Image (cartoon, rainbow, N blue to C red):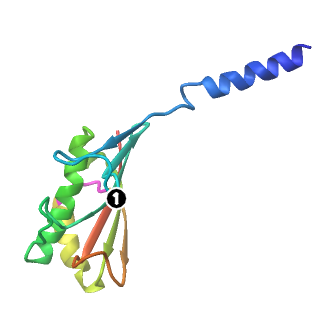
Amino acid sequence: MLKPILSVLFLISIFASPAIRTDKKFIYLPGTKAGGNYTPGILMDGTLYISGQLGLDANGKLPADFEGEVKQSLDNIGAVLKEAGMTPADVVSVQVYLTDGELFQRMNAVYRSYFDDPRPTRTTVVVAKLVGPVHIEITATARR
C-alpha cells in the first residue's frame, strides 16, 4: 500500500517542481509586436536565443556596403540583447551565414570590433542564398 502512495507522491513532486516548469519570455523590439513570422528572441532559464538577424535596418533598408550590412546585423542582435537586459558580453555562441566565402575577412573585421576578448564561440557557414538581397545573417545565444 505504501509503494503506490510513494509513486504518486514522486510523480507529483516531479511535475510540480519549479525546476521543471520554466517560463519563456518573448523578446520583441520597440515598435514591434507578437504575431509576425518569428520572435526576435526567447529568454528561458537565463539563456537568450536570438533569431537570425539580417543587415536590414528597422525600415527594411540595406546599407550601401557589406561592412555596413554586418554592422547592422550585429546592431540588430544588440537591440534584442538590450531588450532582454543583456549585452554583447553575455553572448556565448554565434552562427554566421555568408553568401560568399570571399566576404569572410571583411565580416571578421567588423565582428572583432563588436565582441571583446574572449569572444563567443562561432560557426561560419557559406550558403548559396539568403532571403532577400542580403549577404549575411547572424544568430546568437546569450547567457547571464
Asked if the stretch drawn in magenta spans residue 118, the answer is yes
| Pointer 1 local density, CA inside 10 Å: few below 14, some 14–19, many at least 20 | few
In the foreground, 142 or 121: 142
Q: Main secondary structure of the magenta part?
A: loop
Answer above or below: position of 126 versus 26.
below
Which residue does the image show at 69% across and 22% down from the upper left?
12
Name the outermost residue toward the right.
1
Please provide percent x and percent y for residue 40. 30, 52
Q: Amino acid at mark 1?
A: Asn
Q: Which residues are magenta?
A: 114-119
Please provide percent x and percent y for residue 18. 54, 25
Please provide percent x and percent y for residue 139. 33, 60
- Tell me which corner region of the image, top left, top right, bottom left or bottom right, holds residue 74: bottom left
In this view of the protein, can residue 129 be seen by the observer? yes
Which residue does the image show at 38% across and 75% down from the upper left?
125
Which residue does the image show at 25% across and 46% down from the upper left?
33
Q: How many marks?
A: 1
Asked if the stretch drawn in magenta spans residue 135, the answer is no
Which residue does the image show at 19% across and 67% down from the upper left?
55
Quadrant where the N terminus lies? top right
